[in-house]
Amino acid sequence: MSVIEKSMKDIGVNGLVCLEAGTGAGNMTRYLVKNGAKLVYSISNNEEHLEYARKRLSDKEAERVKFIKADLCNLSIIPSETVDLVTAHMLINVVPPTEILLIFRELTRVTKINGLIVINDYNPLSSYMGKRSYLVEELFKIENALNYLIESKPALVWYPAEYIIQLLKLLGWVLEDMELVYKKTPWEKDLLKEHVEVIEGLCTKVNNERIKNTFLQQTLEIFNKVKDDEVIYAGSIYSVRMQKKLDKMLKKTK
């Protein structure tokens, strides 16, 4: 059973207005549509992600999805208190600390009272560390260092489940459930290769050849230490479910 299936196993989606925050590969959007959602707002700031997710649906299924390119910090296109269910599947780990509260505030605004939010994401890598976990950690350090160099912000941030819960409580949400979907997260070589490709893409934006070559060399040295059939375990994956009882920040600004 996938992370999505485990986190959504006892949530009735049929007839609901849903919002998928961060479309990604469109896995959650596809799940919501196939389980009878009345309407799904699938939102991303990446046009390629939206197009890929759109192609994974039939024409009939796509009629119930609005693919929207937008900044999750500003969802003015969606009226307040009109969404029954918000999902964020593997989104939070790419959100910088300066934006996470702004995003949660907007997701709170668009959600109906008693509506639900389901967040699936990674605990810090330190939540589970094996003998080979350091290889994953070192690879992500390089990705973050490059992104800081180019964008002045991290590419990856690991927020503990407890931190996410406390932020949402400040906005008027009540915890319904929190579970570890994976007590130790499996990182296969193909998945790590995707991060290597991200690093290679970032390196094309570095003008200093010495710095660029140093990062590329370190990345390949780490990646080549991972065996083709090896699975390295690092961190854990959690699922948090909360219910909106009061939009505290929205009330304060009226």
Image (cartoon, rainbow, N blue to C red):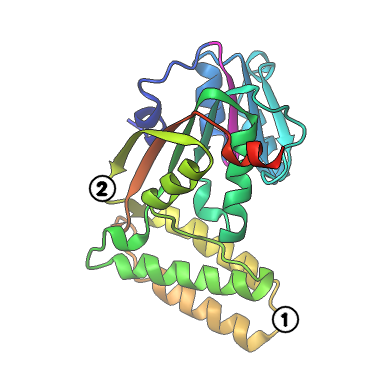
Give 134 or 210, whichever is nearer the viewer. Answer: 134
- Which numbered tag is attached to residue 183? 2
Looking at the rendered structure, the secondary structure element under dot 2 is loop
Precedes in sequence: disc 1 or disc 2: 2
Looking at the rendering, which quadrant does residue 97 occupy?
A: bottom right
Residue 217 place in picture, x, y as percent: 50, 80
Residue situated furthest bottom in the rendering: 210
Q: Which residues are magenta?
A: 15-24
Query: Is residue 215 placed above or below 185 in the rendered structure?
Result: below
Name the residue: 48% across, 48% down: 167
Q: Which residue is mark 1?
A: 207
Give 92 or 76, whichever is nearer the viewer. Answer: 76
- Which numbered tag is attached to residue 220? none
Left or right position of 20 against 180: right
Amino acid at pointer 1: Asn
Give 79 or 135, whichever is nearer the viewer. Answer: 79
